[in-house]
Image (tube, rainbow, N blue to C red):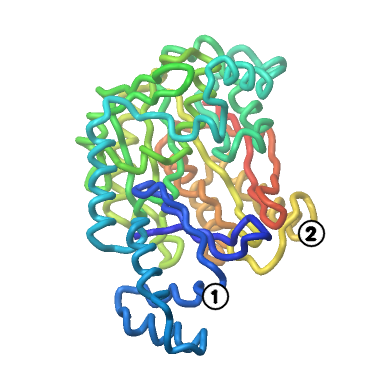
Amino acid sequence: MTLDFMPSPSPDHPGLLIRDPYRFSDAMLLIPPVLVECLDCFDGIQGPLDLRKRLVQITGEIDLGGVDDNLIETLSGAGFLEDETFARMRGERMSEFAASPVRLPSHAGSAYPEDPGEMRDTLKLWMDGAGATAPPDDGLFAIAAPHVSPEGGWRSYRAAYGRLRPEHKDRTFVILATSHYGEPEIFGLTRKPFRTPLGDAQPDTERIDWLAAHGGPGVSMEDYCHSFEHTVELQVIFLQHALGPDVKILPILIGSFAHSIYQGGKPEDDDKVRAFFDGLGELRDRGGDNLFWVLGVDMAHMGARYHDRFEAIAGEGRMLEVESRDRARIERINSLDAEGYWDLVQQNHDDLKWCGSSPFYTFLKTAPKFKGELLHYEQWNIDEQSVVSFAGMGFTK
């Protein structure tokens, strides 16, 4: 299983915070500093005796007072060990998503307001003045926008979604979005409507079914990651604001092309990736001007939160070099240079940690020929020591 580990946000309560990003468990545990060192005993190889030995070494006490048993019971009860409790929680959550007629909002009340009226007012504030200088019909067929919290990235969202026009309303929006927790080289689909406080965005089930049938073995149908991933959801709320709540979507969560990044070669050297590119390319040809492409992508992730040994400040120090490298990649994307773009991604095994690298490459390999334009680039301190970069971009035929 995969868990998120992060330092406690409270100086008064130090330790290691643990949560389950898959939301099989809603628990959050704060492990005291003295016990953090013991967590590597839960590696599937060591057992209770190894844990007890480690605690004796740390505390210098032979009588542990049941600390070892209590730690095991606490982690198990939270669903943080691969045992029967975790298997039950996992099965229940996956069954709930499979049975649900809609994909329920996962980030309402956190990334954006839950109340419909408040949400409309907030979106109007974020989008104020958007589109005032955009051409009415310039052949726009695709945009790229962030998936970072709109609180930090609203200027880039506005730059991208401000290019949409009423005449785009009747198209199907193919959303190519990052799958942060999905398996590498896997493409996640779902037939479920996306519910937000504004209403239900409708899936283009005919095209989704076609892609599921022709996209090859890399397709994961009704991918559970859709239930909690924010990268599609945040595109949906801006689409709904611009074009109405019942906008039609084809959401695709794209896993990392990790094999190519770390082992070399092109992503399509993997049979699953190549088959999906072929299927999506054929869908593009069949759909023509009835399709509009949306990329839900962030770029670099730098600083302490992302395991760099330096503190990152937006627009300063090392982040100036990051901006230069970001812009070099953006230039390759805008010139439709898929190979040149991927060469830059592969450098140093993508030390910029672009979580949008695979959606961008998928777009480059499957979209119609285009000219790209950078509308807005920015960096944002997601915390005091860490920065995410992102942009609003537009693509015309």
For the residues labelled 1 and 2, the Cα–Cα distance comes to 35 Å
Look at mark 2 in the image and give the residue it sits on. 317
Residue furthest toward the left?
213
Q: Quadrant of the N terminus?
A: bottom left
Find residue 253 and report its horizontal and vertical position in percent.
Answer: 39, 41
Residue plotted at (50% across, 61% down)? 5
Query: In the image, what residue type sits under mark 1?
Result: Val
- Badge 1 local density, few (<14 within 10 Å), some, or many (20+)? few
**Badge 2: residue crowd in 10 Å (few <14, some 14–19, many ≥20):** few
Residue 271 left/right relative to 229? left
Q: Position of residue 25 (x, y in %)?
A: 37, 49
Dot in front, 1 or 2: 1
- Kindly state the secondary structure of the residue where label 2 is placed: loop
In the image, residue 285 above or below residue 252: above
Q: Position of residue 202 (x, y in %)?
A: 35, 19
386 left or right of 171? right
Q: Is residue 346 visible?
A: no
In this view, 50 is above or below 373: below
Report which residue position mark 1 lands on: 34
In the displayed structure, 117 sits above or below 256; it is above
**Which residue is at 42% across, 58% downward?**
3
Report the label total: 2
SS of the residue under disc 1: helix
> Which residue, as the protein is rendered here, is positioned at the far right?
316
Q: Amino acid at mark 2?
A: Gly
Q: Which circle's residue, 1 or 2, is located before the other in the chain?
A: 1
Residue 153 versus residue 203 in the image, above or below: below
Residue 391 at x, y percent in the picture: 63, 38
At a point 31% along the width and 56% down the height, the residue shown is 270
Judge by depth and name the residue closer to the eye, 186 or 78.
78
Q: Nearer the viewer, residue 305 or 334?
A: 305
Quarter of the image where one finds residue 211:
top left
